[in-house]
Amino acid sequence: MRIALLTREFPPEIYGGAGVHLEYLARHLDSTPGLDVDVHAFGAPRTSPLVAGSYQPWEALASDESYGPALGTVSVDLAMAAAVAGVDLVHSHTWYTNLAGHLAKLVHGIPHVATAHSLEPMRPWKAEQLGGGYAVASWCEATGLASADAVIAVSGGMRADLLAHYPDLDPDRIVVIHNGIDTDEYRPDTGTDLLAGFGVEVGVPTVLFVGRVTRQKGIVHLLDALDHLSQSCQVVLCAGQPDTPEIGAEVRARVDALGSGPHRIVWIDEMIPRPAVIQLMAQASVFVCPSIYEPFGLINVEALACGTPVVATAVGGIPEIVVDGETGLLVDYVPSPDHDGVPADPARLAGDLAAAIDRLLADPNQADAMGRAGRARVEEHFAWPEIAARTAE
């Protein structure tokens, strides 16, 4: 069976968990007996033999308006749908390619499987970034999911969100398959040779954040929590790619204001090689994921695989990864009544995050025990062989 994987991200152009997932999924599915994989991705041509096509938005739609990227995405979807003639099944990922999967199903008469890595109705703050393009993105997602022959939800929380926002979906067509991780690549690493160039001090209590500068990832709530920390520490922010200039400026101003405080802040505002990220995770005392929306939260699996305890908000799929009191600590997140991406009580969230971080910094033995338990949990539940086998099935 020949399968076309449709994705916005594929190495070397990766910016989030969905892209990491696709990198390994393609590799493992292609090595499964009876399956051949063609990857169709946005962007420049790739050297991987798995990539059958790479696509740029139509130049006529490359508008500077906020809605331009969404219309450009539709143009890529049209090209993808035309290019997958001859495959037996298409598998789309995120709203960026859900429409391509739907169109391929119509024009080629082949099944369409969609993996829901996130849902547009759960991210209303994207209207700030995309303007009217947010409505286009929402339509692409809804259209693709409505007629998909099967939908893979990356967590039980995502499955519940799918049924809540798309009640016409047949529950029997939705299956939960968590994202996977390469446990040989992501593992405790005692090395520090890759960290010197980033200004990270080794051997001191360290709090780590890795993620985009976006409302969804909650970096502003971590910065607010630093005002409440009683334990002195180094805070490493591996954070780039702001969604908008406004949030980029907001975070920059907040970091500058904290610069005179008791905590040493190191901001790495660039994409760094994966081995360096693994060393950062392995050397950190605590990994913090303050997201306000996280359908799965692969970054938490990565940190646990490196033997580092996690402090995270209990949103989406995170409670399926982080076992509270065993592999880390979970903090309640209560959204504002209008669900606009703002917590109902930002001060309380900041205080709760700080209390959880303080607890682990103050008790290194407990933190180490949680890190070991986290590594064991990842090996048991999130290793790629099982995840790939379930997806192939």
Image (cartoon, rainbow, N blue to C red):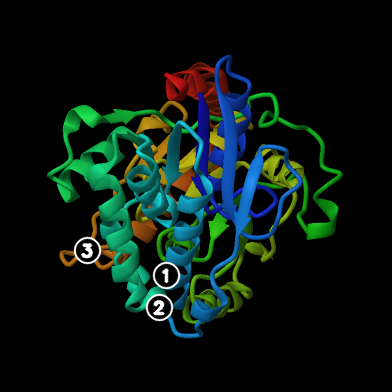
Left or right for 152, reference 375: left
Q: Which residue is mark 3?
A: 339
The kind of secondary structure element at disc 1 is helix
Q: Amino acid at mark 3?
A: His
State which tag comes first along the sequence, 1 or 3. Answer: 1
Tell me if I can see residue 294 in this picture: no
Observer-side mark, 1 or 3, equals 1
Which x, y percent locates residue 120?
31, 58
Which x, y percent locates residue 52?
64, 44
The span from disc 3 to disc 2 (Cα, nearest Å) is 22 Å
Residue 62, placed above or below residue 5: below
The image's mark for residue 184 is: none
Tell me if I can see residue 122 in this picture: yes
Mark 1 Cα within 10 Å, few/some/many (few <14, many 20+)?
A: many
Q: Is the residue under label 2 in contact with that under label 1 (CB below 8 Å)? A: yes
The span from disc 1 to disc 2 (Cα, nearest Å) is 6 Å
Left or right for 230, reference 204: left
Residue furthest to the bottom: 64
Observer-side mark, 3 or 2, equals 2
| Nearer to us in this view, 243 or 236 | 243
Residue at 13% x, 45% y is 167
Q: Amino acid at mark 1?
A: Ala
The span from disc 1 to disc 3 (Cα, nearest Å) is 23 Å
The kind of secondary structure element at disc 3 is loop
Residue at 67% x, 28% y is 187
Residue 110, placed above or below residue 67: above
The image's mark for residue 70 is: 1
Task: Classify the position of the C terminus by image quarter.
Answer: top left
Indicate the quadrant where residue 114 lies.
Answer: top left
Q: Which residue is mark 2?
A: 67
